[in-house]
Image (cartoon, rainbow, N blue to C red):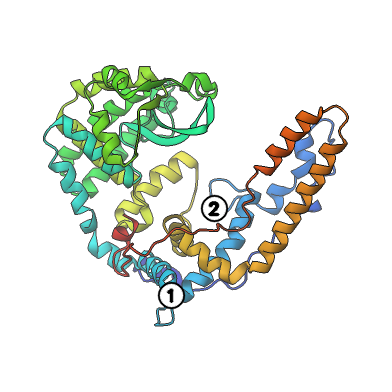
Amino acid sequence: MILALLAQLGIYPQIALEKPPARLPGVDLRLIDATADPCVDFTKYACGNFAKIHPIPADESSYGTFDVVSDYVSYSVHAMLEKASKGGTERDDNEQKIGDYYAACLDVQTINARGLRSLKTELDRIRRLQRKPDLASLLAHYRLLEVSAFFESRVSQDLKDARKQILVFDQGGLGLPERAYYLREGEKDKRILQLYETHIAKTLALSGESDSESKIDARNVLLIESAWAGASLDVTARRDPMNVYHPMSIRQLQTLASEFRWRAFIDQDGIPNVSEVNVAIPSFFKRFNVILARTSLRSIKAYLKWQLLSSLPGVNLPKPLDGEIFDFDSRLLRGQPEQSPRWRRCVRNTIYNLGDAVGQVYVAQEFPASSKAATLQMVHDIEAAMTDDIDQLDWMSPQTKLRAKEKLNLLANKIGYPERWLDYSTVEIRRDDALGNSL
């Protein structure tokens, strides 16, 4: 009761779980529902009791074995972050960063007081946009913030040549989970779209727009996203790799979608030596070109602002924005009745943004080098046994056996943690700026 009252006031004292969740056994026979016939319903037989033993918590939208493991790990990381957040000169650089990041995330009073002050530079960047050709530079910067406005871009293996990587331009830019939300005609679906438009307007209003401005901008954002949805492939069509594989030169892409400066985007994105790209869905980018040409700069700015705001973690935003995001994204779309405790959200947020720093401290505490060595030896023993098996196969020719061993030897054994960690030494983490830290 006391903690609940403190939480309403935005005060979160340092807390620790009373006891860790139970560890998940490798094989849990309690999950078997022996009343089910495995020949009729094997899933119910094998794990029919899981939901009885592990009901979905009120602050989750789903729950499975990975979530059970995650709960156990979260307990260890929570205790670790609580210790690191207390400060002290004995902390190393990683402990300072993860401790201060976590402490800032817990400090609701400061988050509410600062508002969106840390976002001013990014909002000003949108306001200063005067010409559509300058959009390429802005979107390249957005990519660094993990904001996927208009389209997706990524580097991945070439689908027809795994020896090389290729820059991929793909459909994207939607605020709802996928295209069908915009295109279905049922009454429930239309209601979700109406609520989504209201959600956009509320979010923009909470960011400082007037009610009238926010409603106009929300309508324009929905029109833009609906156009993207209409040009996108559905999830079934995307399962065919050939439907999302269309390599072409930068010049060909520029001809396909001439309203956007693709070379400027690539150059500012910092990806070197790009001569060929995979334009996953050419029809999408052809439509993108038409929409970009027809859409007013004001509508584009509203869409960019919405994409920026909706990409931010609610836990680092002022309480009204955090609550609005939860009500729509989690309660309405995913059926999650309650928001997770703040400490749990801050643990997840710290892991997401400073993963390798958390990982290094966690490994030092929970996974000694001897455990990694023992696990690696077990893997080597398995590989040796597989090599022996290949030698004894009578249906393989000597040449095929040689190639099979080469393939086996090419496997990379990634055990526990990487040999080279990400370096966060240039990242500044402040104890009084949760939103700035996440940016």
Task: Name which quarter of the figure residue 218 lies in.
Answer: top left
Identify the residue shown where x is 37% and y is 31%.
172
Q: Quadrant of the C terminus?
A: bottom left
Residue 1 visible in the picture? no
Q: Is residue 62 above or below residue 195?
A: below
Percent from the top left, x then y, of residue 240? Answer: 54, 21
Identify the residue shown where x is 43% and y is 75%.
92
Percent from the top left, x then y, of residue 177? Answer: 43, 34
Q: Which residue is mark 2?
A: 58
Q: Is residue 219 above or below residue 408?
A: above
Question: Foreground mark, 2 or 1?
Answer: 1
Q: Residues within 10 Å of mark 1 (few under 14, many from 20)?
A: few
Q: Nearer the viewer, residue 43 or 127?
A: 127
Identify the residue shown where x is 32% and y is 28%.
225
Task: Name which quarter of the figure residue 125 lies in.
Answer: top left
Q: Earlier in the sequence, mark 2 or mark 1?
A: 2
Identify the residue shown where x is 33% and y is 21%.
285
Q: Is residue 96 above or below residue 352?
A: below
**Total labels drawn:** 2
Say left or right for 336 vs 399: left
Say left or right for 16 vs 311: right
Q: Which residue is mark 1?
A: 92
Instruction: Kindly report the distance in space between the C-alpha atoms of the residues bearing marks 2 and 1.
Output: 37 Å
Percent from the top left, x then y, of residue 25? Answer: 74, 58
- Residue type beneath disc 1: Asp
Q: Residues within 10 Å of mark 2 (few under 14, many from 20)?
A: few
- Residue type beneath disc 2: Ala
Residue 385 visible in the picture? yes
- Dot 1 falls on a residue whose secondary structure is loop
Percent from the top left, x then y, of residue 372? Answer: 66, 62
Q: Nearer the viewer, residue 98 or 278?
A: 278
